[in-house]
Image (cartoon, rainbow, N blue to C red):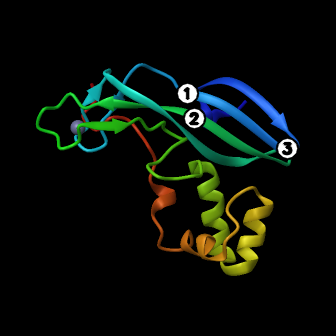
Amino acid sequence: MFPHLSGLVIERIERCHDVIALAARARGSSACCRWCGSRSTVVHGRYSRQLTDALVAGSRVVIKLTVRRFRCVNSTCEAVTFAEQVAGVTKPHSRFTPLLTGMLTAIGKALAGRAGARLARALGGGGQPAHVAALGPGDSRASRQAGACPRGG
Ligand SMILES: [Zn+2]
């Protein structure tokens, strides 16, 4: 039903007014360090993160994601721990899924400013003109995706 969320295990779906909240966690038992690419299965801890996704049937979609923090197994890596990223769902520090970021970027390119912010709000995304404009031409955030480990494993 949501192919861009195939990397997640959806544990619960709740609807409150015009918001659909998905409680989810990543599939699989390992993740790759974003600095060195080493795959790790050593979970150091967990925390909650909230992402906004594209509207579904006119409702805002919020993903309440339980994120695992892994210990990097590469002794030469400067990162002691790292947070897992889910392809198609998360990017470091982003509050939006790549799908919604792509939509906001398209709005930023076409409209920018206040008109873009109004349309972005209507589509469930951010509503600040500066934010929408920042996702316009020249911004590469939308094209970066969480993906496979560079060094596999
Ligand atoms: Zn590492």
Quadrant into which the C terminus falls: top left
Seen from the viewer's position, the closer of residues 88 and 34 is 34
The location of residue 26, given as percent across then percent down, is 51, 27
Residue type, mark 1 in image: Arg
Lower sequence index among marks 1 and 2: 1
Residue 126 position (above or below residue 31): below
Mark 3 falls on what kind of element? loop
Residue position for label 1:
25
Mark 3–mark 1 Cα distance, whole angstroms, equals 23 Å
Residue type, mark 3 in image: Ala
Mark 2–mark 3 Cα distance, whole angstroms, equals 21 Å
Count numbered badges in the picture.
3
x 24%, y 32%: residue: 72
The yes-or-no answer for disc 2 within 8 Å of ligand 1 is: no
Q: Residue furthest bottom?
A: 113
Residue position for label 3:
57
Seen from the viewer's position, the closer of residues 58 and 83 is 83
x 48%, y 38%: residue: 87
Residue 29 position (above or below residue 78): above
Mark 1 falls on what kind of element? strand
Mark 1–mark 2 Cα distance, whole angstroms, equals 5 Å
The yes-or-no answer for disc 1 within 8 Å of ligand 1 is: no
Do the residues under discs 1 and 2 have CB atoms within 8 angstroms?
A: yes
Quadrant of residue 84 within the rendered picture: top left
Q: Residue furthest left?
A: 76
x 47%, y 60%: residue: 141
Residue 54 - label: none
The location of residue 8, given as percent across then percent down, is 57, 28
Do the residues under discs 3 and 1 have CB atoms within 8 angstroms?
A: no
| Neighbours of disc 2 within 10 Å: few (<14), some (14-19), many (20+) | many
Seen from the viewer's position, the closer of residues 30 and 153 is 30
Quadrant into which the N terminus falls: top right
